[in-house]
């Protein structure tokens, strides 16, 4: 999977249950290279950790997914449901 965002960059993560954003009052930042072969594992771990945080906050998490967002523009760069 190739992205036009090369090298290690900072992104904001948003956690969703389907179309509903959970933990929206919190800010999650990650530094990741979206072209790296390890990117899937990094995002899978983030998805698992944020899903657990949402469950701990009594949020429903039937269809967890992450949006990887450019923090400067607010543009969604990647929608992640797991590798």
Image (cartoon, grey):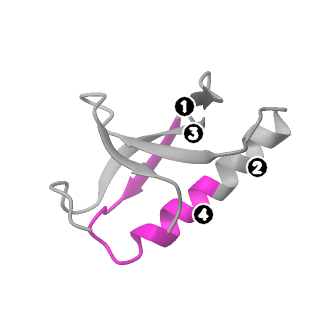
Q: Which residues are magenta?
A: 28-47
Mark drawn on residue 52? 2
Residue neighbourhood size for the residue with mark 3, other residues' Cα within 10 Å, grouped as few (<14), some (14–19), many (≥20): many
Tell whether 68 sits left or right of 57: left
Cα separation, mark 4 vs mark 3, equals 13 Å
* Residue identified by numbered label 3: 15
- Residue at the left extreme, as displayed: 4
Q: Position of residue 6 (x, y in %)?
A: 18, 61
Q: Earlier in the sequence, mark 2 or mark 3?
A: 3
Along the viewing direction, whichever of 74 and 32 lies nearer the viewer: 74
Residue identifier under label 4: 45
Query: Is 19 or 5 nearer to us in this picture?
Result: 19
Query: Which numbered disc flags the more N-terminal residue, 4 or 3?
Result: 3
Q: Quadrant of the N terminus?
A: bottom left
Residue 72, x across and y down, in percent: 26, 30
- Return the disc, 4 or 2, that comes first in the chain's sequence: 4
Dot 1 crowding, Cα within 10 Å, few <14, some 14–19, many 20+? few
> At 51% from the left edge and 46% from the top edge, which residue is drawn?
66
Identify the residue at horizontal 22%, vertical 63% (top origin): 7
């Amino acid at each position: 999977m190739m992205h036009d965002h090369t090298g290690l960059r900072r992104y904001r993560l948003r956690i969703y249950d389907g179309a509903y954003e959970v933990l929206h009052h919190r800010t999650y930042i990650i530094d990741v290279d979206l072209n790296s072969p390890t990117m899937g594992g990094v995002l899978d771990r983030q998805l698992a950790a944020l899903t657990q945080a949402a469950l701990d906050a009594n949020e429903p998490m039937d269809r967890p997914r992450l949006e990887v967002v450019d923090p400067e523009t607010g543009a969604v760069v990647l929608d992640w449901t797991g590798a």
